[in-house]
Amino acid sequence: MDKILIEGGHPLKGQVRISGAKNAALPILVSSLLAEGSYTYSNVPDLKDVESIKQLLSNLGARAEAHGDKVHVDTGRILSYEAPYDLVRKMRASILVLGPMVARLQKARVSLPGGCAIGARPINLHLKGLAQLGANIILEHGYVQAEAKKLKGADIYFDTVTVTGTENLMMAAVLAEGTTLLRNAAREPEVVALAEVLHKMGADIQGAGTTVITINGVTSLKPVSVSIIPDRIETGTFMIAAALTHGDVTLVDCEPDHVGACIDKLRRAGVRISVHEKTIHVDGNDEFISVDVKTQPYPGFPTDMQAQFMVLMSIANGTSIISETIFENRFIHVGELKRMGADIKISGNTAMVKGVSGLSAAPVMASDLRASASLILAGLVAEGQTEVNRVYHLDRGYEAIEKKFSELGAAIKRVK
């Protein structure tokens, strides 16, 4: 199993290109199931999760091949309607095949995703919405079986905001008969990106990016060639890394509008940031100010940036309160940061972070994707050599992260 070694204390300097967004690429690749034909997707990141979704598409009978940052998908021959446990267990986003398969094939059998290190992420809202669209849902032997001769439009309200639930039902509804309303819908840029791709395929969707999405069903869709939007979480991670190391870094091929909440909090913490059309320049100060953060659905501060921001707050002047409102187990990284000298106290879904003068290197264990990133950031600023174990989580969501940091001047390497 790989580990990453980091010698702290090297300011990051230079330019880094932001990769395509994992959380946009996955549903967009899955949307190819909605219409027979050949698709080309560019700016697709080379990640384990993308590989998993390609394997799942191939298992269903599609052809999915990568050439550089392009992925070609041909859905002319879908031979199976089952997404088996061995593939779904690798990645919860596999549940996204449910909606488009029922819409196009009239049936689907998908393994239940199971647990997650950062907390329970139930798919009950997906199933409730599909049932409202007219699908017959059966749960047995660890699988969801859904069938519908023809989905029909419905007025669907999400009890809680769900990104994958919004995406799944949006894909199901585009071929449904009549009009579907998705209320309390997720507003994330990845949802908007999927809606734009579906619109290019011929779907009639209005309101993506707001809390109410209206979908007027169409009889057929067509294949497309599209580019994946930049990854806003990778953008935020590199912004914080530049600040932490008192660096001077320009992020290119990014989307500043998608990271407005992160930019606001970093500026309040004393980080100098300048924004241009597709670039962000970060000039780290010598000292940082403690800032309170509460994670919220987009456009609020993202839960996927909470762990990284906590590292910055651990060396800021003062005490910050970080509240996690999205997932119940997303403070697993705190124990590892405390091993590196951070002063953090947990009470329920709140962390009180008292800034210290510096962090010290230690062997640490990654527990999930974003926790892995936070430990890498802590290693960049800690005194000594930090050893981050179980870094396979990183490969699910960050493309060549150690290579990018190395090119910015970090003393970082992966050891087999």
Image: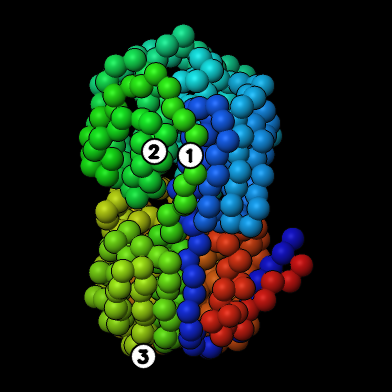
- Upstream in sequence: badge 1 or badge 2: 2
Residue name at image x 65 percent, y 49 percent: 66
Residues at marks 3 and 1 touching, judged by CB atoms closer than 8 Å: no
Q: Amino acid at mark 2?
A: Lys
Image quadrant where one finds the N terminus:
bottom right
Image quadrant where one finds the C terminus:
bottom right
Residues at marks 1 and 2 touching, judged by CB atoms closer than 8 Å: yes
The local secondary structure at tag 3 comes to loop
Location of mark 3 (residue): 286
- Percent x, y for residue 7? 61, 84
Mark 1 to mark 2 CA distance (whole Å) = 7 Å
- Percent x, y for residue 347? 35, 58
- Upstream in sequence: badge 2 or badge 3: 2
Mark 3 to mark 1 CA distance (whole Å) = 48 Å
The local secondary structure at tag 1 comes to loop
Q: What is the crowding at mark 3: few (fewer than 14 residues within 10 Å), some, or many (at least 20)? A: few
Residue name at image x 67 percent, y 28 percent: 61
User: Can residue 285 be seen here?
Assistant: yes
Instruction: Find residue 200 and name its label.
Output: 2
Residue name at image x 56 percent, y 76 percent: 405
- Percent x, y for residue 92? 54, 39
Location of mark 1 (residue): 224
Q: Amino acid at mark 1?
A: Val
- Percent x, y for residue 173? 37, 24
